[in-house]
Image (tube, helix red, strand yellow):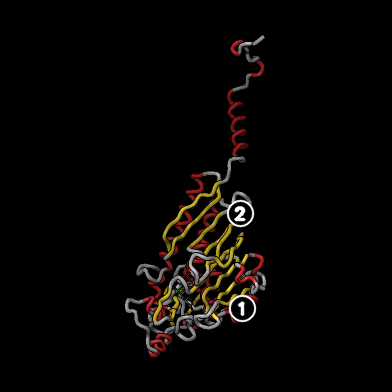
């Protein structure tokens, strides 16, 4: 016999008060929320001369996009403070007024200039944010595509040198010892912007994200499937090919190379990085990838090691806890590339077979 549904009467004693039902449902939904899948939300914006992509892992779409917006705004703000190209940046004002100076600056600019000088000390002057006057000489940075004379280089060097930057931490002022000086934060500000974006995401409650500024990045946490973020390191001479694949978790990975921005003349490559000790563009090292605890330091270190070259560069990184490095250098100009890596590098990288036997 089939009993009709309509004939079934819910016993009165099972009826619940309206408020109770709502509360029970809320608990149920909250519980179900734990099983809503985490998704990767991403956005890309042109910033700091490159394309910045930020990916965040979140359940809630609105929260994800709000966090992305805040992180990008923070990077844009930093570019506005630290760009050497923008007339209205705080850095440009410092460059105009630093001599005779001193100039009162924001705590943030003071801190990053101080950090830059710390890295000058660590790299024995290979990394130097006071290279502004030198950069202006090289064709990559000027309209006339001619190489500077030795005299012009020697003259520019008079206005270069981290010891000529006067920092007063009490008064938060910066001054220049000689006229014609100009600071350039191109070797460290991108890393700083990445770290600040990561901080913004953390404050928004994000636990897993990738902030990637044209290959310089910080990887936070893990992807929704539990695996680490995978990062490819580009071959500096063969476009589109990778030399290494990195599994990154809670580390920064920053690469300095001569292969993206350079000027070619008579078969010679003039990199966008200058050697502050000679005044000429850095030579011989094609790329330097640094893994480290934060992107600010990794950025400065990668630029510094590119100037120092593989031997001195490796020696320096081996003394720095928490940092690893991989260097591709030219044994002789135009010849093949030599691979050099620090001892802990294996923990992070899977290296292309062509270079594999040379990884310690
Ligand atoms: P990228 O900007 O390609 O990521 P880097 O982090 O190595 O590469 O920064 C290169 C920039 O740093 C240059 O464009 C210039 O603004 C600045 N720079 C050049 N030479 C030096 C140097 N020896 N020390 C510090 N900064 C430098
Ligand atoms: Mg750098």
Residue at 62% in and 68% down: 353
Q: Position of residue 70 (x, y in %)?
A: 47, 54
Relative to 107, 1 lies left or right? right
Residue 76: quarter of image:
bottom left
Q: Nearer the viewer, residue 60 or 248?
A: 248
Residue at 58% in and 53% down: 208
Query: Can residue 99 be seen?
Result: no
Query: Can residue 277 be seen?
Result: yes
**Residue farthest along the bottom direction in this orientation:** 151
Q: Position of residue 78 (x, y in %)?
A: 45, 63
Q: Nearer the viewer, residue 298 or 17?
A: 298
The residue labelled by disc 1 is 316
In the structure shown, which secondary structural element does the residue marked by tag 2 occupy? loop
Q: Position of residue 15 (x, y in %)?
A: 63, 19
What is the number of the mark on residue 222? 2
In the structure shown, which secondary structural element does the residue marked by tag 1 occupy? helix
Residue at 48% in and 74% down: 258
Quadrant occupied by the C terminus: bottom right
């Amino acid at each position: 016999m089939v009993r009709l549904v309509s004939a079934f009467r819910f016993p009165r004693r099972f009826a619940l008060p309206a408020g109770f039902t709502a509360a029970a449902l809320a608990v149920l939904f909250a519980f179900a929320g734990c099983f809503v899948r985490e998704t990767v939300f991403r956005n890309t914006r042109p910033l700091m001369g490159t394309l910045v992509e930020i990916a965040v892992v979140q359940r809630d779409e609105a929260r994800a996009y709000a966090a992305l917006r805040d992180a990008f705004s923070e990077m844009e703000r930093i570019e506005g403070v630290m760009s050497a190209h923008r007339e209205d940046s705080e850095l440009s004002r410092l460059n105009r007024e630093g001599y005779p100076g001193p100039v009162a600056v924001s705590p943030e600019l003071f801190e990053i200039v101080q950090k830059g000088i710390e890295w000058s000390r660590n790299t024995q002057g290979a990394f130097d944010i006071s290279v502004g006057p030198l950069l202006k000489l090289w064709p990559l940075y000027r309209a006339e595509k001619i190489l500077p004379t030795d005299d012009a280089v020697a003259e520019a060097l008079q206005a270069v040198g981290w010891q000529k930057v006067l920092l007063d931490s009490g008064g938060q002022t910066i001054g220049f010892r000689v006229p014609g000086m100009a600071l350039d934060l191109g070797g460290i500000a991108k890393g700083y912007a990445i770290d600040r974006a990561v901080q913004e995401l953390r404050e928004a409650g994000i636990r897993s994200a990738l902030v990637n500024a044209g290959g310089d990045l910080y990887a936070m946490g893990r992807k929704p499937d539990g695996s680490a973020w995978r990062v490819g390191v580009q071959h500096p001479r063969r476009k589109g090919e990778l030399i290494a694949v990195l599994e990154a978790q809670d580390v920064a990975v920053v690469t300095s190379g001569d292969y993206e921005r350079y000027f070619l003349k008579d078969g010679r490559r003039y990199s966008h990085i200058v050697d502050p000790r000679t005044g000429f563009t850095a030579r011989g090292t094609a790329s330097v990838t640094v893994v480290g605890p934060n992107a600010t330091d990794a950025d400065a270190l990668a630029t510094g090691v590119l100037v120092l070259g593989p031997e001195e560069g490796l020696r320096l990184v081996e003394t720095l806890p928490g940092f690893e490095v991989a260097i591709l250098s030219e044994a002789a100009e135009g010849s093949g590339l030599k691979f050099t890596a620090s001892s802990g590098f294996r923990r992070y990288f899977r290296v292309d077979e062509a270079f594999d036997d040379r990884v310690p």
